Amino acid sequence: MTTALPDYYFRIRENGAIVFRLDTENRNRRIEMDQIAVVNLRKGEIKPHGDTVLSVEDEAAIEAWVIERTELLLHREVDDILRTVDHLNLTTQWAQSRASDDQLEAVTDTLLLAMHDLRNVLVRKKADRLEQDR
């Protein structure tokens, strides 16, 4: 570990994090992790843990983390979709060049329905955007 630890540790959970304040200034020089809050990104909530009263520094650090984490998740979401486009292209190549009849039979209906559903949503959303632009 490095000698300079951050003041806070954010244990990521599905929709946010549990926030800990780190303390190494104890007599044993051990890392103490005191839970101070729970963050819910979906609801935009920051709840102090137990009787903890968050300081201005605590709130600022948590709010900075929320902004950074939200931006990261948005970037990952778009990146995941672009990876899906790549995967669709690889699937097309597989179906055209290597897939056996049995393999195609196993995936065709499910894949066609998923692509049909996606196409309907994309076309509808694009039409909505074009309508708004008018």
Image (cartoon, rainbow, N blue to C red):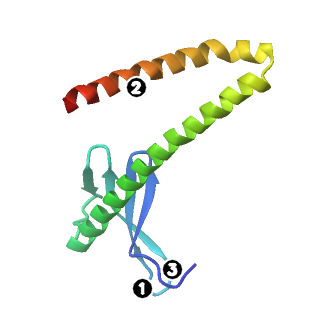
Quarter of the view holding residue 127 = top left
Instruction: Say which mark, if any, is on residue 30.
Output: 3
Towards the viewer: 78 or 128:
128
From the top left corner, tell me how far across and down residue 72 is, in percent: 42, 55
Q: Of all residues shown, which one is farthest toward the bottom?
A: 27
Tell me the CA gap for discs 3 and 2. Answer: 53 Å
On-image quarter of the N terminus: bottom right
Inspect the image, locate mark 1, and give the three-letter code of the amino acid beneath it: Glu
Inspect the image, locate mark 3, and give the three-letter code of the amino acid beneath it: Arg
Where does label 1 land, which residue? 25
Instruction: Give the class, few, some or many, for how many residues have Cα within 10 Å of label 3's Cα (few <14, many ≥20).
Output: few
Instruction: Give the class, few, some or many, for how many residues have Cα within 10 Å of label 2's Cα (few <14, many ≥20).
Output: few
From the top left corner, tell me how far across and down residue 84 is, in percent: 56, 36
Quarter of the view holding residue 110 = top right
Vertical side of 88 occupied by 16: above or below = below
Of circles 1 and 2, which is in front? 2
Instruction: Say which mark, if any, is on residue 43.
Output: none
Considering the numbered disc 2 on the image, is that residue within a helix, a strand or a loop? helix
Residues under numbered marks 1 and 2 in contact, where contact means CB atoms less than 8 Å apart: no
